[in-house]
Amino acid sequence: MVTAVYVAFIGLPLLALVIRAVLADGFPSSLTTPIAMRALRLSLLTSIASVVVIVLVGTPVAYLLARRTTRVLRTVDLLIEMPLVLPPVVAGVAMLMAFGRRGLLGGPLEAVGLSLPFTTAAVVFAQVFVAAPFFIRAAKIGFQSVDTELEEISQTLGHSPWTTFWRLTLPLSWPALAGGLALSWARALSEFGATIMFAGNFLDRTQTMPLAILTAMESDVAAALGLGLMLLVASAFVLVILGLVARARFNGPPGVGP
C-alpha cells in the first residue's frame, strides 16, 4: 500500500505534465517556438561542453582519488562532493563571489580582458560546478573496482602506465564511467539555480531550457509545458542508459585487449 501511494505521488505529476502538454492548444508548434528552439540549442551546446570538461578534468582526478588515500586527498574528495549537498543558488552566489567583478578573481580576470558573469561561459562554469561530482564519484568507484594487481602485472609485462590505463583500467571500469557521464549530463542539462545566479537569464546567451520554462510560464504556458516535456524525455533517456549500463556491469566487463 505504501509503495502504491509513493508510486502515485511520483507518477501522477509526471503523467499530468505529459497529458497537459499533449492536450495544450498548439502542442506540436509549442515544441518548435523560437524560445524553445533557442533554449534547446543553448542547453545542448553548454551541457555537451560541460561534459567534455568534466571528463577531461574529472577522469584523472577520480583515478588519483581511487588509487591514493591521504588526509589531503580525503579533504579534496570531500570538497569535490560538496556541490551534491550545496543548494544550487548558494553555488551561484559563491561563484559570483569568486569570479564576479567584485569577486576574489574578478579584478585579475578583468585585467586580462575576461568577464565571466552573465555570459555563455558562465553557464558552462555553473554546469560543471554542480554536475562534475556525479561523474567523479562514479568514476572513482569504477577505478576502485579494478584490481591494482592487474595494473602491476601489465606494467611488469612492459606496458607503460598510460597504455595500462587505456587498455586495461578504462575498459574494466567503463560501465561506472558511462553511468557517471549520463548522470552528469542530465544534471548539467537541468541546472537552474547556479545558472540564474551566476549567468542570468538572457535570451540566446544564458537562457537554457530550465530558465526558458520560468520565462515561458509568465506568458506562454504551452511553451513551458513543451519544454518541460522535452526535459522529461531527456531524463527518461538517461534512465534507459543507466539501465543498460547496469545490465552491462551485471553481465561482466568487456574483453580487455592484450
Image (cartoon, rainbow, N blue to C red):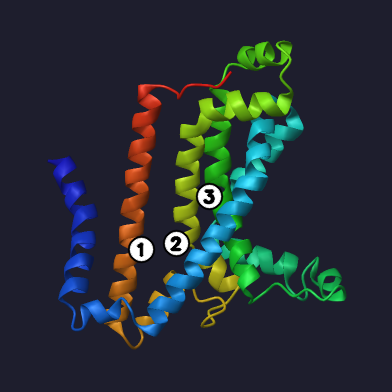
Residue 121 drawn at (x, y percent): 65, 69
The amino acid marked with disc number 3 is Val
User: Looking at the rendering, which quadrant does residue 230 occupy?
Assistant: bottom left
- CA gap between label 2 and label 1 equals 7 Å
Question: Which quadrant would the N terminus be assigned to in this image?
Answer: top left
Q: Nearer the viewer, residue 36 or 118?
A: 36
Q: Is residue 256 above or below residue 65?
A: above
Helix, strand or loop at mark 2:
helix
Q: Is residue 98 left or right of residue 189?
A: right
The amino acid marked with disc number 1 is Leu
Residue 43 drawn at (x, y percent): 48, 67
| Residue 231 numbered mark, or none | 1
Q: Residue placed farthest to the left in the image? A: 1
Q: Can you see residue 159? A: yes
| Residue 190 numbered mark, or none | 2
Residue 122 drawn at (x, y percent): 64, 69
Residue beneath the point at 74% across and 23% down: 160
* Circle 2/circle 1 CB separation < 8 Å: yes
The amino acid marked with disc number 2 is Ser
Q: Is residue 134 left or right of residue 31?
A: right
Q: Nearer the viewer, residue 114 or 10?
A: 114
| Residue 85 numbered mark, or none | 3
Residue 183 drawn at (x, y percent): 45, 47
Helix, strand or loop at mark 3:
helix
**Badge 2 local density, few (<14 within 10 Å), some, or many (20+)?**
many
Q: Is residue 9 above or below residue 68?
A: below
Residue beneath the point at 48% across and 53% down: 185
Nearer mark to the viewer, of 1 and 3: 1
Mark with earlier residue (2, 3):
3
Mark with earlier residue (1, 3):
3
**Badge 1 local density, few (<14 within 10 Å), some, or many (20+)?**
some
Helix, strand or loop at mark 1:
helix
